Image (spheres, rainbow, N blue to C red):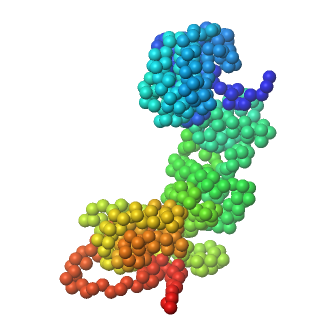
Amino acid sequence: MAYQALYRAYRPQTFEDLVGQPHVRQTLTNALRSGQLAHAYLFCGPRGTGKTSTAKLLAKAVNCLEPKHGFEPCNACEACTSIQRGSNVDVQEIDAASNRGVDEIRDLRDHVHYLPTMAKKKVYIVDEVHMLTPEAFNALLKTLEEPPPHVLFVLATTEPHRLPATIISRCQRFDFRRIAPEAIVERLRLVAQSQGIEAADSALWRLAEAADGGLRDALALFEQAAAFGDGRIDDATVADVVGSVDIGSLVALVRDLAERSFLSAMERLGRWYASGKDASRIVHDLLQVVRDLFIVKLSQSPDALAGKPVDPYLPVASRDDVTAEWLLAAMRRLGELYTQLRYVEEPRLALEAVLMSLAAERRSREAEGDSSASIQPARTVAAARQHAPASEQRAQVAADPPAQALGPVSAAPEVAKRAREAREAARPASSRAAAHRKRETLARLYRDRDEALEARLRETWPDVLASVKAKRVQTHAWLLHGEVALVTPHAVVLSFKSRIHREAVMKPADRAAIEAALAEALGQPVQLFAILQADWEEFAASVAPAIAEEAGSQEASDAAPADVDVVQLAIDLFGADKVTVEDEGDDG
């Protein structure tokens, strides 16, 4: 007998074998037992969740000559075996992707009135029914609404939103759910035992997670891993098959970050890249591992991961220097990176920067807990002193929790002020100085705020975006994530939720394109500033109300504003090492 793929060989043959869809099984078995079957069913859901298998089960159940318990097919009579072989002429499986025209549906409509040849009912299983043309749907309407009593329609689709409402209303709809990983693992264990394949539980869980709720995908990956491992499936085998990194190596990377072993972490990343691993896949797998570590850290229960083995995580989760707060911050940073990687020209550099900042954040948190603790090797001390202003500032900005959203300013200034003072007390001196410079610069800009000019820019913001898009499409993609924070006669401050977007718009070419568009919209040249939205909201909730009150009390005595030194503003906001001053000179 010819070899069959595992997902075909282990297709459920009874309703009891149907995995992960108890609501579908119970409803259909009750209808079969009572004899109250609908004339048309619509099976919706993701791929590999059992839609076509359930349709074939239903076809066998309504045609079985000796059903068990009134609903289970016996799988022994001529009707069951012929349907299982695909040779029963009364059960037709139609691929709507290749038979999508009105002519095919007219042909079906002409043949539907003939009585079944050998079965009790004629069953039409229309797979991927959303691929039918509008004309084909219209031709099917009347037949689907009032089919002959000997006909049963089963429509299956992964995209029910593409079906006309007139089709959906004529069917009894079942929504198939993604199958839970524990149910997939249990099924894979049975297959492994039946096939004589040695498979580790942790490897089966990785396969279940990679399948994303589809049992067919899980069985296909299982089959591939078994062939690759020559009958033995472990974590390394699964990692090679699905293109991911094995759990042990990922947990070891988290341990390196917690221990601030920068070189070891970089070497691991280098080996993964050399073996062909993709940055987005590494971030995805690392995010999953950090999430599992966070749950194990909080739960301390053998069943913390709903049956998934916790042994690989315990050595790192039990460490005192791996705190729940640090793991939560790591999840936030990795989650942001995962969504932004497609915009980054060098994903590897972005990943390395985030991982190193997490390790530095680990050091910063330890420094907050024990200010007398010394930093370890002398070589690390020298490197830290050399790069302290930039690296510590980036690490601290990442460590800061997001400020509250802007709300009523009556009670917000005092609350935000106390929170800011508490954070500043724990910051290193260099970080406190940088944060102070940033607030002072924003305060100076806020005092020169021109509300009329700001309102005009907000109204013409779509025109600014269109102008930037005409000049640089990539810059337009970055700018879409920005919002106007404040406008002065000399400067425009934009706020961004992501640090990646903020840094991108400040590159020379991108910044020049945006400033040119702003000049067109405002009718005067302006300087562009970019800031994180969390920093702007904190400033707006704490410092801005005091400045507004001060400006109101001194409005009568204020002199005409002096010219703003844009260069000094830029140096105060971004640091002297980030600003280059060029003198354009005279053209003549």
Residue lying furthest left in this view? Answer: 556
Q: Is residue 184 left or right of residue 193?
A: left
Residue 383 image-quadrant placement: bottom right
Residue 219 image-quadrant placement: top right
- Residue 316 in sight: no
Q: Position of residue 255 (x, y in %)?
A: 63, 59
In this view, 387 is above or below 132 = below
Quadrant occupied by the N terminus: top right
Q: Position of residue 180 (x, y in %)?
A: 56, 36
In this view, 417 is above or below 137 = below
- Kindly identify the residue that appears in the image at 62 percent across and 61 percent down: 347
Residue closer to the observer: 346 or 313: 346
- Kindly identify the residue that appears in the image at 30 percent across and 61 percent down: 407
- Kindly identify the residue that appears in the image at 69 percent across and 17 percent down: 87
Q: Is residue 211 left or right of residue 150?
A: right
In this view, 181 is above or below 446 = above
Q: Position of residue 316 (x, y in %)?
A: 61, 55
In this view, 75 is above or below 504 = above
Q: Position of residue 333 (x, y in %)?
A: 53, 60
- Residue 564 in sight: yes
Residue closer to the observer: 370 or 102: 102
Label tally: 0
- Kindly identify the residue that appears in the image at 53 percent across and 14 percent down: 151
